[in-house]
Image (spheres, rainbow, N blue to C red):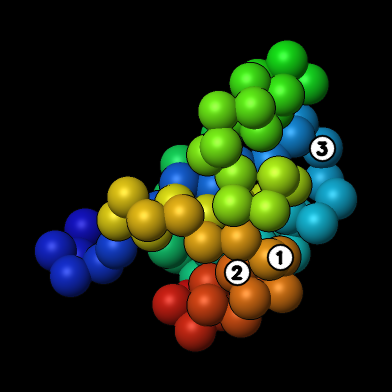
Amino acid sequence: PDSMAPSLKLFYFNMTGRAEPIRLALTIGGVEFEDVRLTKDEFMAKKTDGSLPLGSLPVLEVDGKTVCQSYAIQNYCAKLA
């Protein structure tokens, strides 16, 4: 793996939805990422503990920093790919 590549962790539900274009961009582009599929209970826990900036999914963790908004994430991932 490229040592300069960011560590990516995508959080969404176990469905396609708004995260699917992000997953596709990363997968087709050969970009390594962790695909974290949350249950409703896990989502509610994250929402309650404040780890979701706008209280919604998807979120992308980039080198430990949380990024939200699906179109912004999608554009960033397309540029990485």
Q: Are marks 2 and 1 in contact (CB under 8 Å)?
A: yes
Looking at the picture, does residue 27 appear above or below residue 52?
below
Q: Position of residue 16 (x, y in %)?
A: 82, 46
Quadrant position of the N terminus in the picture = bottom left
Q: Residue at x 46, y 54 (%)?
A: 66
Q: Are marks 3 and 1 in contact (CB under 8 Å)?
A: no
Quadrant hosting residue 40: top right
Q: Earlier in the sequence, mark 3 or mark 1?
A: 3
Q: Residue at x 60, y 69 (%)?
A: 73
Task: Name the residue carrying label 1.
Answer: 70
Residue extending furthest right? 17
Looking at the picture, does residue 49 appear above or below residue 9?
above
Report the side of 20 relative to 73 (left or right). Answer: right
- Cα gap from disc 3 to disc 2, whole angstroms: 17 Å
- Regarding mark 1 in the picture, which secondary structure is present there? helix
Q: Earlier in the sequence, mark 3 or mark 2?
A: 3
Task: Name the residue carrying label 2.
Answer: 73
Residue type pointed to by label 2: Ile
